[in-house]
Amino acid sequence: MLAFDSVTKTYESFQLGPLDLQVDDEILAILGPSGCGKTTLLAIAGGIVQQDAGTVSLHGDSLDSSAPEDRGTVVVFQDGALFPHMTVRENIGYAAGPETDVEGLAETFEVTALLGQRASSLSGGERQRVAVARALAADPSALLLDEPLTNLDAPIRHRLREDLRAKLAPLDIPVLYVTHDQSAATAIGDRLAVLNDGAIQQVGTPATVFEEPATPFVARFTGHDNVFEGSIQPGTPHPHVQWGPYKLETDCAGLEPPTDIWFSIRPEYVRVVPEAEREATPNVLTGSITNRLFEGDTYRLRIAVEDLDERLDLTVLRPAYDHHGLDERDRISVSVPPTAIYLDEVE
Amino acid sequence: MTSTSRRTRWSGDWLAVALLLGGVLLLYYAVPILAIFLAQSPAAVLSELAAPSVRSAATTSVLSASITTVIAVCFGVPLAYWLARTEVRWRPLVDAAVVLPLVLPPVVGGVVLLTVVGPNTVLGSVASAMGYELTGSLIGIVLAQTFVASPFVIVTARAAFAGVDQDLEHASRSLGKRRLTTVRRVTLPMAWPGIVAGVTLTFARAMGEFGATLMLAYHPRTMPVEIWVTFLEAGLGNAYPVAVVLVCLSVLALLVLNVLGSDPWSE
């Protein structure tokens, strides 16, 4: 287990921690925006940056006084950090022991044909494959990956994402995977830790983090673009959410009214309601379309909700968009299914 | 005509202007050097080479410049690496100390050195008592050349080290390699062309060192001192062949070092 115990690092205008985190023999994806401290956390684990306070340990042994080369925590950098003056074979074999099967690793990561090439001649995707192969050749006790897919084109990124998951999952060592890309985090991580402004906001399985975000920040960062504040009011069978003049039905129980809450609604759960169905549909809101973004299979619409100074985002499939004959500045009705409202108490 | 093509045309024009301006300087460098070669018959140069004083001066220059270069590399390259990697606040002071000999007139450098290693100084006396003369000797020449020429390798190698992405060093250490192994296998090979450029400059500067050398060691004569003495004693015409020999030695050194310093991993 790789463990961070009250780890703190302070820079002039930023502080990481105090932070506690345990990474078992699993892939833990650290998800957070640029500048949240996730790379600093990884650098501390790798011994590249020294923490101001707290302890980092691996399988119970403190790493704090160990040099990077003695830790067994191998870092894979964003651009691969391959040695450009060496061939791919020399890179993979750089830290390999006498019994390491360099050829086998090259085959696993589909770089056999590149073994004789200079590392400087590789494409981005090839570089990352070689970088991970090189890291595994060093027989790491823990693997630390710093946004390895960030600079790749989408098709290569998606392919490599699958490959990384398939090759890292069976390793049975702590793997820390730092990224700002929520899709990469959920695809690769066994668990997610969401980091913001130097503090961990939530740790959990990808499904838990996405379905039950612990804070408004996590909600927004994981795609709950509609995050608002309201209050819980008595209702039947469940309490209502009072949102300005609107009363929204929910299926949430457990919060005693009246309680101030924040709630979120994923754009893909909001649906356009034809005029004829308004009366029979719960949680109908009316507003006019202020923005429209064509996203290929879908349109992303933003509506200014009437009687409320709020904007609500929704995604509409193209056929539905055409069927309803929608256009910018149209006045439309939308509904939010009670099951699509996730809410929590304001702290 | 599109704005892109306009930009392209202007870019071409400015390049031509830049070459024209630079070309004036290039001519200024090349013409005198060509002239000195044309002013001499090869026979005159060869006969000068046969003169014992010239051969002795050439040997002293090559020997002292080589020793100076080795010293500059042994002490200067580690300092260059430290300067490229350290984050201590007083680094600018070290930077200034390194650059100081470059901006100091060489003769002043010689005076400065004499206050430390001159015959009447503590250091000079102790060394003399041990049988080592710090002035008027090969040691004196090396001391003068090292003072004036070694900053070149430090400044150039420092830039070369700074150009090596630190993540490569972090990656190497993270893969289990010690700092020294990392420097040997990753940093040095990548900084190699820059370091060799610095070595070249240091060697060339040491070969041509005159001002500080004159103050510390008039004897044994180096090539620049020999040229100076010949010029004073026998006139400019007699100094030409010796100068040609020095130019040839310098160019040869540049060629050798540049071949060594060619990009070791270019395809």
Image (cartoon, coloured by chain):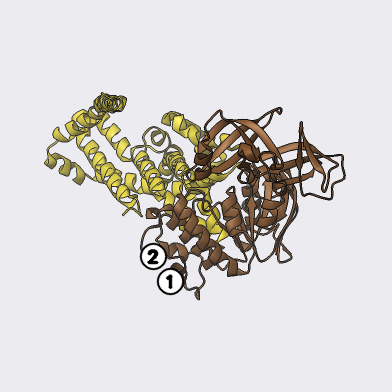
Residue A46 in the image, given as x and y percentages of width and height = 62, 56
Quarter placement of the N terminus of chain A: bottom right
Give the residue pinned by disc 2. Answer: A115
Considering every residue shown, the one lying at the far bottom of the view is A99
Residue A86 in the image, given as x and y percentages of width and height = 41, 59
Colour displayed for chain A in the image of the structure: brown
Q: Quadrant of residue B41?
A: top left
Q: Can residue B145 be seen in this view?
A: yes
Please, is residue A172 above or below residue A43 in the view?
below
Q: What kind of element bears circle 1?
A: helix
Q: The disc labelled 1 sits on which kind of residue?
A: Glu
Please, is residue A209 above or below residue A261 in the view?
below
Residue at mark 1 to residue at mark 2: CA–CA distance: 8 Å
Quarter placement of the C terminus of chain A: top right
- Report if the CB atoms under discs 1 and 2 are less than 8 Å apart: yes
Categorize mark 2 by other alpha carbons within 10 Å: few (<14), some (14-19), many (20+). Answer: some
The answer to which of B147 and A161 lies nearer the viewer is: A161
Q: The disc labelled 2 sits on which kind of residue?
A: Leu
Q: Mark 1 lies on which chain?
A: A
Residue B89 in the image, given as x and y percentages of width and height = 63, 37
The answer to which of A324 and B164 lies nearer the viewer is: A324
Colour displayed for chain B in the image of the structure: yellow
Please, is residue A29 above or below residue A293 in the view?
below
Left or right: B210, with A237 as reference point: left
**Disc assigned to residue A103:** 1
Q: Which chain carries label 2?
A: A
- Whichever of labels 1 and 2 marks the residue nearer the N terminus, that label is 1
The answer to which of B160 and A23 lies nearer the viewer is: A23
Left or right: A169, with A217 as reference point: left
Q: Can residue B128 be seen in this view?
A: no
The residue at the point 49 percent across, 51 percent down is: A79
Left or right: A46, with A240 as reference point: left
